[in-house]
Amino acid sequence: MEQMKISRVWVDATHVYAETTSGIRASYAFSDWPRLANATEEERQDFHLSYSGIHWPQIDEDLSFEGMFEDNHLCKRSPKEELVCYP
């Protein structure tokens, strides 16, 4: 299976978004995550990307790309535990 590749990540006043190179987009509401819900705009804008997700160093929060896409019902686990995504 081809690895899902993230092309961009951004935040606005209420959500964090991730988009794959194939155009699949997922998001999380900050309100679902206490540290992000209580963070300032500056803290939310200060994130770093890793191979597997997003890290906010000022608030010590991490979100995985796999979790984000699964929770948005854009990907699911195959019987072999591979992540399968669809447009």
Image: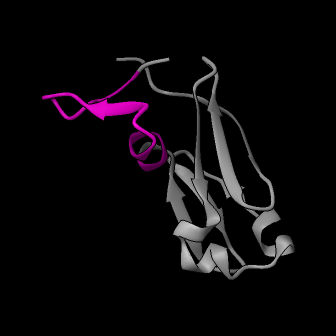
Viewer-closest of 13 and 69: 13
Relative vertical location of residue 64 with respect to residue 33 in this rendering, above or below: above
Relative vertical location of residue 5 with respect to residue 28 in this rendering, above or below: above
Residue 54, by quadrant, is: bottom right
Residue 84: in magenta span: yes
Relative vertical location of residue 29 with respect to residue 19 in this rendering, above or below: below
In magenta, the rendered stretch is 67-85
Q: Residue at x 63, y 65 (%)?
A: 30
- Left-right relation of 47 to 31: right
- Left-right relation of 45 to 80: right
Residue 35: image x %, image y %? Answer: 60, 79
Viewer-closest of 70 and 8: 70
Relative vertical location of residue 48 with respect to residue 25 in this rendering, above or below: below
Residue 40: image x %, image y %? Answer: 80, 78
Residue 63: image x %, image y %? Answer: 52, 59
Task: Pick the quarter of the image with the N terminus.
Answer: top left
Q: Residue at x 26, y 30 (%)?
A: 82
Residue 75, by quadrant, is: top left
Residue 47: image x %, image y %? Answer: 73, 61
Q: How many numbered marks does the figure carry?
A: 0
Q: Residue at x 58, y 25 (%)?
A: 24
Q: Residue at x 15, y 29 (%)?
A: 80
